[in-house]
Amino acid sequence: MPGGPWAVRRSGGGGGHRRGRAALEVYEHGELLDVLVASRLAPRLLRGARRSTGGGRPLALAWGRLPARGPLPVVEFTGGRLPLRRRARAVAPAVPVSGAFWLAWVEGPFTTVRLRDSTGDAPDERLRLARARRAGAASGGAA
């Protein structure tokens, strides 16, 4: 993880004392932000996206479900401005988590994330990056 206010926790799935479907919990400033549960019924691969400044650096995080088959999706962060009025753009690797989910993060002034299925079988998905809440702010819904 890139630092900043986020943390993730895997739960469920696997053997031993944990049963049921795999789940991924996403936290922001220690408060639960989102929960994803492994499902074959959920067609969307891009679930959430946030932006923040950690240690004075702009950071972006996106997460979602892995495709049912095929390679990892391509995660592209865009938006913001660089010197000379150029738009910021970066492709970040999708890091698999628990065989059912992915995370991607990047440093930079980004405002949007686009997810592309590298096989071309599924349409692109886009989300605006929601600004991370300040530590101690009232809880809200998932991104």
Image (cartoon, rainbow, N blue to C red):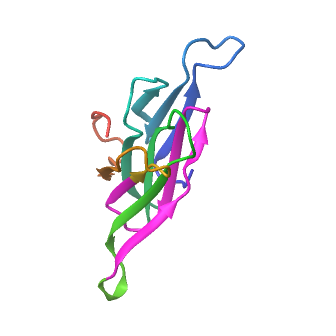
Up-down relation of residue 46 to residue 83 (above or below): above
Quarter where residue 2 is shown? bottom right
Q: In the image, what residue occupies the spot 44% across and 51% down?
A: 61
- Give the quarter of the figure containing the C terminus: top left
Up-down relation of residue 8 to residue 90 (above or below): above
Q: In the image, what residue occupies the spot 54% across and 54% down?
A: 3
Quarter where residue 20 is shown? top right
Q: Which residues are magenta?
A: 86-114
Quarter where residue 12 is shown? top right
Q: Nearer the viewer, residue 50 or 22?
A: 22
Horizontal and vertical percent position of residue 92? 52, 59
Q: In the image, what residue occupies the spot 44% across and 50% down?
A: 120
Q: Main secondary structure of the magenta part?
A: strand
Q: Nearer the viewer, residue 3 or 70?
A: 70
Q: Nearer the viewer, residue 83 or 124?
A: 124
- Please, which residue is most extreme toward the bottom here? 84
Count of numbered marks: 0
Instruction: Work out whether residue 55 can be spotted.
Output: no
Horizontal and vertical percent position of residue 83? 36, 85
Instruction: Work out whether residue 75 can be spotted.
Output: yes
Horizontal and vertical percent position of residue 140? 27, 35
Horizontal and vertical percent position of residue 17? 68, 11
Left or right for 122, reference 131? right
Does 89 lie within the magenta span? yes
Left or right for 140, reference 76? left
Does 98 lie within the magenta span? yes
